Structure formats: structure tokens, C-alpha cells
Amino acid sequence: MTTHLITGAGSGIGAAVARRLHDRGDELVLLARDAGRAREIAAHHPGARTLVADLSDPDRISWALSHQEVPERIDTLLHIAGVVDLGTVGDLTPKAWHQQLNTNLIAPAELTRLFLPQLRVTQGHIVFVNSGAGLTAHAEWGAYAASKHGLRALADSLRAEEHDNGVRVTSVYPGRTSSPMQAKVHSQEGREYDPDRWIAPESVATAILTAIELPRDAEINDLSVRPGR
């Protein structure tokens, strides 16, 4: 049975991906920031396993996982969790920078490092859900875009390093997607939020599943998903 480790499965794109994989009977390992959140997520996916680690504190991820039973087999590692905090470079504090760089870039790098041995054995697949901000940076998006530009570099380097081990690496760049994060962004921008204007999380999930289901003779390196409305 195929086993997927997913971050960000509690809402938005991550929840949509988890639902799709759970519905088809795959094995899920869902990472949550604390025990309470782990119970909430597991309740929506009966039979799924959970792990607890705070992505905003990547220095402690290895320690946290060492005190839990981690899966022996991982076929896909799906980095979907992320945080955003808008602000100009002149206003953003080191705390805002650290929060976004830790969660969006350093934690994915650390989780990848920890689970690479399993992924090499299975010749697995690592998916980084990036953002349009990982391709183009706009005013007030500096810290978030920096974290996502870094995530693109991480994926590109990892792909080159792990190619001979048979590990596939895909970056997905969704445009604005209907989610709690998007509602927060609109609030910070001072705009009314209309979820029907943006991409449905299920549509991004379809793109992600297309990448991981591709036959072994091919690999999707980069996949952009833009609003069709």
C-alpha cells in the first residue's frame, strides 16, 4: 500500500489532498503542530496515523519525531503547510521573517532530510507546494516570497542530488486558492474575501495527484496552477 506523509492536512489544499488519498484507500501519515490538532485531523481521516511536530520550530523537529513511532515506509512526502504575514520590508520584524522562513522553508528541508532514507528505498516522490510568490515577488510579500523562492531552490537542488537515487521532486505553484490562508491575506490587504473568485483546493489537489501518479518514465518538475476565472 502506498504511504503518504502530509503536512498541512488540516485545511485548504492539504485537506483536499488528504481526502482524495484517503478515499482511494492509501495509507496516510498526517503531521500536526500539537496533539490537539492531531486528534482533530485524524477524526476526519479514520485509520490515518499522525505525527506531532511544530514546523515553526525546525530545530526541534528531529527531537519531536524521535519520541514517536515514525513510519518505516514513505512513498510520497507532501509539503503543503505554510504561513503568510504581509508587510513591507521597512516594517517586517525579525520575528515575522523567522516565522515564515522556518515554516515555509527550513522545516520542509529538515523533514526531507529526516525522511530521505525511506524515500530512497521506495524511490519515492517529494512534492513542495510552493506559490506564485515563489516565482514573482510583489510589494508587501517580501518575507513570504523569500521563503517560497528559497523553497524553489531547495526543490531544484534536491532534484539534482537525488535523481540517481530514483527520488522524484515536484514543485507546484498555485495561484490564489480559496482557503483560510487566503481569507487572512485578504484581511491583511483590506479587501473583501470572495472564495468563489479563486481556485478551489480540490483543483490544486488534482494537479498534485497528477504529478505523483505519473508513470516512472517521466517526472513533472514544475507545475503552475492559475485561477481560470
Image (cartoon, rainbow, N blue to C red):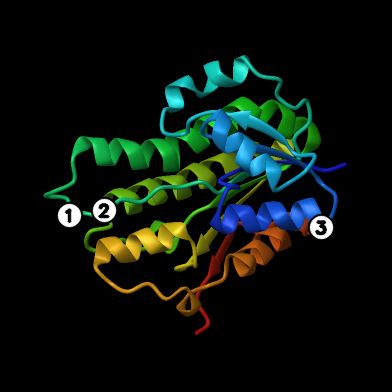
Query: Quarter of the image holding residue 40?
Result: top right
Which structural element holds mark 1? loop
For this orientation, the residue located farthest to the right is 1
Residue that appears at 37% across and 46% down: 147
For this orientation, the residue located farthest to the bottom is 229
Q: Earlier in the sequence, mark 2 or mark 1?
A: 1
Alpha carbon separation for disc pair 2 and 3? 37 Å
Query: Quarter of the image holding residue 37?
Result: top right
Image: 191 above or below 120? below
Amino acid identity at mark 2 = Gly
Residue that appears at 63% across and 30% down: 51
Q: Earlier in the sequence, mark 1 or mark 3?
A: 1
Q: Position of residue 180 (x, y in %)?
A: 45, 58
Q: Position of residue 101 (x, y in %)?
A: 36, 39
Alpha carbon separation for disc pair 1 and 3? 43 Å
Numbered circle sitting on residue 58: none
Image-based side of 52 in relation to 22, left or right: left
- The residue under label 2 is 142
Numbered circle sitting on residue 215: 3
Q: Earlier in the sequence, mark 2 or mark 3?
A: 2
- The residue under label 1 is 88
Image-based side of 68 in relation to 218, left or right: left
Q: Nearer the viewer, mark 2 or mark 3?
A: 2
Question: Label 1 neighbourhood size at 10 Å, few (<14), some (14-19), many (20+)?
Answer: few
Q: Is residue 77 something that shows in the picture? A: no
Question: Label 2 neighbourhood size at 10 Å, few (<14), some (14-19), many (20+)?
Answer: some
Which structural element holds mark 3? loop
